[in-house]
Image: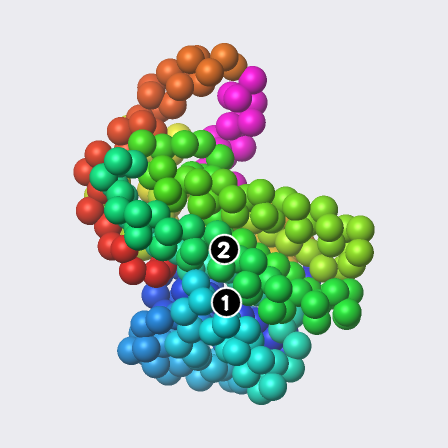
Amino acid sequence: MSEIAGRNIVITGAASGLGRLMALELAKKGGNVAGWDLDRPGLERLLDELRPHGGRPRVDAVDIADRTAVYAAAAKVRAELGPVDILVNNAGVVSGKRFLDLADAQIEATLRVNTLALFWTAKAFLPDMIAANRGHLVTMASAAGTVGVPGLADYCASKFGAVGFDEAVRAEMKRIAPGVKTTVVCPYYIDTGMFAGVRTRFPLLLPILDAGRVTGRSVRAIERDRPRVLMPFLVYLVPLLRLLPVGAFDAVAGVLGINVSMDHFAGRTSPM
């Protein structure tokens, strides 16, 4: 079981939504939280919320899509806090448009923030974890990283990439630094506002998830070194459903309402 108290933690996309909740929960457990985001006012509010929990909280305005900025910010964190023990890659963007309605710049932004940034942050902090043979890399992915959804072509591609990234790094760590653990979190839509307007046909099977519950499950996974969190339970069945013929798989997705879930999307596009 991973100990949170006293650990140095970096969380991307920490100024709001799930990132903010993760930051607060890990700080309550005694972690030294460094929050990264582009939302400076949000970061200042977060810092005010973190201070009562003690530790050595800090916030930094960082464009995680810029690898040079990531490496510079990582050096500052290491200089002030020391080696980072837990990295939570949470920041994400969603455009919510049909594929052919996406501007080229939107596609590139989604992949830079949701996928490529994982490489830059991990390259910045994993070497210290490997040297100590201790640490935890958390990838906040999505159920959209397990099944394609109309209106989310760029987002799904980026989250499929995030899931594959986690799996490959997990396998590498088992070979070279088994004390370094990874966790990938793949929730269905969460009520943070990022996916405002999405609908679910069967709320009991595919509920719009409470952000606090996702946070709690994610933090417990870190504490217990669980490699994967899928929410709700139905997401665990996706690999089995893929044994069906493609037409049947698509039909199941249609019946469950997944293929029309984005039809009324009105969410924000700022980092989560």
Q: Which residue is mark 1?
A: 67
Quarter assignment of residue 17: bottom left
Task: Report x, y in % for residue 54.
Answer: 51, 84
Contact (Cβ within 8 Å) of mark 1 with mark 2 = yes
Alpha-carbon span between mark 1 and mark 2? 9 Å
Q: Residue at x 53, y 21 (%)?
A: 242
Q: Residues within 10 Å of mark 1 (few under 14, many from 20)?
A: many
> Hey, what amino acid is under mark 1?
Arg
The outermost residue toward the bottom is: 80
Q: Amino acid at mark 2?
A: Leu
Inspect the magenta stretch and tell me whether residue 242 lies in it.
yes
Specify start and end residues of the magenta stretch as a single range: 230-243
Depth check: 90 or 100 in front? Answer: 100
In this rendering, the answer to whether 271 lies above or below 31 is: above
Picture coordinates of residue 112 (x, y %)?
A: 43, 56
Q: Secondary structure at mark 2?
A: helix
Quadrant assignment, res 199: top left
**Magenta part, dominant SS:** helix
Q: Which residue is mark 2?
A: 116
Q: Residues within 10 Å of mark 2 (few under 14, many from 20)?
A: many
Whether residue 107 can be seen here: yes
